[in-house]
Image (cartoon, rainbow, N blue to C red):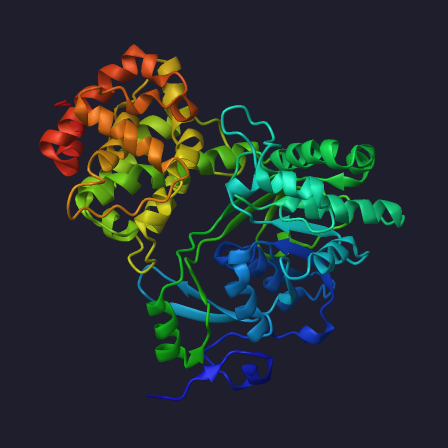
Amino acid sequence: MQPTIKLNSAHISALPKSVGIPAYDRTNVKTGIVHVGIGGFHRAHQAFYTDELLQNHGHDDWGICGVALLKHDRKIYETLKGQDGLYTLLITEPDGTRTARVIGSIVEYLFAPDNPKAVIEKMASPDIRIITLTITEGGYNFNADTGDFQSVEPSIQHDLNNPDRPQTIFGYLTQALKLRKERGLPGLTIQSCDNIQHNGAVTKKMLLSYITLAAPGLTEWVLLNVSFPNSMVDRITPVTSPADIQSLQDDFAITDAWPVVCEPFCQWVIEDDFINGRPEWDSVGAQFVPDVIPYEKMKIRLLNGGHVALGFTGYLYGYGYVGETMSDQVFFDFVRGFMDEEAGPILEPVPGIDLESYKNTLMQRFRNPFIRDQLTRIFSESSAKIPKFLLPTINDQLKINGPIHRGALIIAAWCRYFELAEEKGYRNEIQDELHAVLLEKAKESRAGDELSFLNIGSIFGELATNKRFIKSYIPILRGLRTYGIREMIKKLDEHKL
């Protein structure tokens, strides 16, 4: 066994020559971006693009200060602190080839629960011109049915009553923007990098809703001095496993407590609406456009919709990973059929994108056996994902009397998962805020009320009253109980419902 090198600034020059390292002097990098939510996706995506910029083009005033916002983020904060903000990005090709690269663009790091004042002051610093966010969909605190801000949430009430010790992103942003206004400083850009349709517009609406309650006198200043560009982000980034950490030690002699594994594909489409300057991310592969909506709709309906299509279906058959599921031709054809027949035909043209090539690339990405992307990650919080990633396709097809069988099967597979959830020996690994409701409705479905699952109005709206959808859904659900998922997919493709 070769000795390994602990990753930090002092040891970086001793790393094997096969490992890419920052070619720039990190001590000269000035922080111009605060990023909230320094998990795997940010480190595979926005921090990667920024590192590319620093590597190849200078721009030393665009370093990142990473903020760990929540108490359970302590581990990632302590990991980055112990490694001087450095981490390894393991880029895994479809043939299994791995490239290790140390990313150095996170040059500062703060743990908000321990020192909220330091985070507020950093956001209010005149050096900071952009605040970016990866806080997951739940962090935006909107009602999935209405899209309205949920002011009664305990964490929001805490922030309203304790403005100097906030817990939510809205409390931090409001305090920082108040300081910028009071100090006569310029505004900045707040950019969501989360997988939410119209993410910039959602961020703006939620923040202004909070400000209306917390500091109404700040509203006009924010409208004039803060921009909220929409963006579309894409890079498959599985959860880091102990095996990934070990392979980094074995193959590259690096001891890194929290590396990030990702695919080679990377995409970032950004609305060009930055009020106080921006990095030239377009020089390293990002795309600035006047309107992100066609791109995000394409990605949500095809990539995220494709993930939804294979999540519960693959899991019901016993698969655990995306690549494993896609290696089975039955499931591969099912996902491609969903894209070709249901999701793809109702998309508008996307500037500069050939949809057939895009779908082909997606299928190759999904099939990569070396990206150990767990199905449980894909279908976690499905009650929030399915209304955005799948139901719009189903509803659009219902309006034009188009095909819906694959969409119906995906929902039936979701119901079937919960129908089986309490059977002895069954792997019930679901994480969902509505877990109890889903489980109860699936029990009722199995007991004889086959529309019970669809009658969760907060998820499905009025789908349970659509006769055409029901006509497809019920035979498929019964077929899953009788034949199992793989045979039911085959019967679906053979039109033997």
Of 493 and 85, the residue lying toward us: 85
Number of numbered callouts drawn: 0
Q: Position of residue 245 (x, y in %)?
A: 39, 71
Task: Answer above or below: position of 120 versus 444.
Answer: below
The answer to whether residue 466 is left or right of residue 413 is right
Residue depicted at x 13% and y 30% = 481
Of 481 and 168, the residue lying toward us: 168
Residue furthest to the right: 184
Q: Position of residue 72 (x, y in %)?
A: 51, 57
Give the image quarter of residue 120: bottom right
Q: Position of residue 220 (x, y in %)?
A: 82, 32
Any part of residue 494 in sight: no
Residue depicted at x 45% and y 36% = 300
Residue furthest to the left: 482
In which quadrant of the rendered image does the N terminus lie?
A: bottom left
The answer to whether residue 214 is left or right of residue 8 is right
Any part of residue 489 in sight: yes
The answer to whether residue 392 is left or right of residue 67 is left
Give the image quarter of residue 460: top left
Task: Answer above or below: position of 226 versus 88.
Answer: above
Residue depicted at x 33% and y 59% = 94
Of 292 and 122, the residue lying toward us: 122
Task: Answer above or below: position of 435 versus 364.
Answer: above
Q: Position of residue 372 (x, y in %)?
A: 32, 58
